[in-house]
Structures are given as structure tokens and as C-alpha cells.
Image: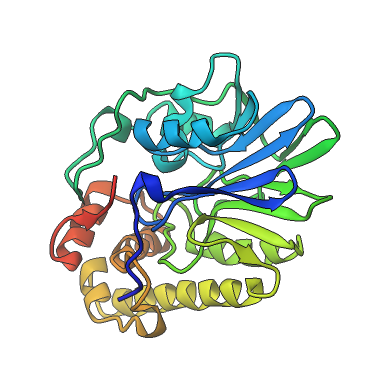
Amino acid sequence: MGEVVDGSPEAAALREIVPGVYAWVQPDGSWWVNNAGVITGDDGTVIVDTCATEQRTRRFLDAVPGPVRIAVSTHHHGDHTYGNSLLPDETVIIAHEATRAVQLTDPIIDGCPPFWSPRPDWGRVSRRPADLVFRTDLTVFTGRRRVDLIHPGFTAHTVGDVVAWLPEERVLFSGDLLFHGLTPLVFMGSLDGALRSLDWIADFEPAHVVPGHGPLIAAGPLPGVLAAHERYYRLVLEAAKDGLRDGLGPLEAARRTDLGEFGGWADAERLVLNLHRAYADAGGAEMDLVAALTDAMTWNGGPLATSV
């Protein structure tokens, strides 16, 4: 197994990447424990994502310098958005139009099902969808600092993925298009799209990447991180192809899959969820979320571990 990291809220830290641009890094980056970003300027602060729970989000917001004028949601998942409701009323929340649509119907914020242990305690958060949406790209400024918000043009981690790109500083906030050092999750997206997104990210040629989960990524290690993602996604696609050929369900296909180099990544049970996505896409059907999470629990031998 991978290194054991302190995943408590107190272990989170605001790390300056370049002057005035920060990453909020939350170890261990596993289920419901995400990274976020802070971009300062003369006109106030832009943040990239919030956190899953009231406790984690308040700790993040207490560390943010200056008033939060704009909050960007990189996608709809609750670990990046449930804390939006704790932002000041005057903060404008921006997301892709598909992200807002899913936020309006997300059932998990109303009561987390028993797939995780300990079951997350959201605290006093409530549904707060985006105020401003876009379809392809949108540029915002704080002072002279430019932030480009860009959708890849296809479904990848989710249907509404957005990156925040600072072209002058060459800093990329990738959201969950990248997981660094732990198992990627695409069960609400597309394996093919996730593969396409890797070249799309590489084309930015960033000097610094803030992944949705895990440690920061510098330009030098980035090609290796992207290559590891590609190998993992291809492993999932191959396992799905073989399982479908042999008449196996996603759980059975996962049980006979050798994770090899990826066996040490945290949250290995996501293989089952990713296989459910691959099976659904191959059959042109909707994925059964409850069945997928139930199978992941079975493969894991119990609820999925989290620290929220």
C-alpha cells in the first residue's frame, strides 16, 4: 500500500506556487478530500473549488487572503463544491453549464449513503449551484491577472470539467482531470474522454499543475504523471473488453484484473467503478450508480475509507 498520510483538516496547507497564486493541498487527497486554489489580485481573490464539509471549507476560507470575489467550480462533485454555500452572498460562483445542471439534482448532499466509513459529516452546507455558467471558455480578471476557464469540449472526468489556466504564470488548476499518486476516478465521465484529456492538458505546457487530488506537479514530472494515467485508463479499457467478451460483470472483471504498478495507489477499489463506466459506455446504457458503489464495497471488503 502507499504511504500513510495525515488526512486531518489540520494537515491542509496553503502553498504559494508563484507570487499571489496558491494551492490549498489537503493530504491524503483520497475520498472527499480535495485540493483547491487561490488566485489574488488588485480586485480581490478568485478561488478554484471549495471543499466537501463545513469544517474543511471554513479552514480553507480562513486561510484565503482578501475578499473572495469569484469562486470557480471545476466540476460538480461535492468534494469540490459543497462548501460553496459558505461563501459570502456577493461571491459569484462560475462553472460549466453542465455542472450547474447536475448540482441542482445531486442527491448525496441531502444525505450521504453508507458507502464510506466514517460516513462524511457535511456540517452546515447546503445546495448552492453556479450563478454564472459558460459552454466553452470564459476569461476573468482580478486586477491585471488573467484566469482562463476552459472546458475541453468533451466529457472526461465529468461532463462539465473546467480547468483554470493562468497563461502568464503558466499555472494550471486541472480539477479532477488529474489525480496525482492515487487512483483516478471516471465513473461519472468517460474513459475515452479521460484519455483525450491527457494530450489536451499536455498542450498547455504548464510550469505548475495543481491536481484535483494529491501533491502538486512540476513541469518535469508532468509527462510521467500523464503517462501513468494513460496506462491506467488503458488497463481499465482492456479489462472491460475482456470481461464483456467472457460474459463477466464489472465486479468479476475487476476481481481477475492484476493492477500491477497501480496496486499501490490509494483507492484501488475505483477500478470497479471505472469498469462500470466502461461497461455502460460499451453498451450505450446509463450507469447504475448504486450498483457500482455496492460492487466497489464488495471488492474492497467493506465501506470505502475516508477521513471526513
On screen, residue 168 above or below 234: above
Give the quarter of the figure containing the C terminus.
top left
Viewer-closest of 281 and 47: 47
Image quadrant where residue 73 sits: top right
- Residue 216 in percent (x, y) is at 58, 61
- 117 displayed left or right of 276: left
- Residue 110 in percent (x, y) is at 27, 27
- Residue 13 in percent (x, y) is at 50, 49
Image quadrant where residue 199 sits: bottom right
Viewer-closest of 15 and 83: 15
**Residue situated furthest top in the rendering:** 89
Residue at image location 40% in from the left, 51% down from the top: 11
- Residue 160 in percent (x, y) is at 55, 42
Colouring scheme, one of rainbow, by chain, secondary structure, one colour: rainbow
- 232 displayed left or right of 291: right
On screen, residue 298 above or below 255: above
Residue at image location 20% in from the left, 43% down from the top: 119
Residue at image location 36% in from the left, 49% down from the top: 286
- 144 displayed left or right of 80: right
Viewer-closest of 214 and 273: 214
- 116 displayed left or right of 218: left
Q: How many marks?
A: 0
Residue at image location 45% in from the left, 23% down from the top: 86
On screen, residue 122 above or below 213: above
Give the quarter of the figure containing the N terminus.
bottom left
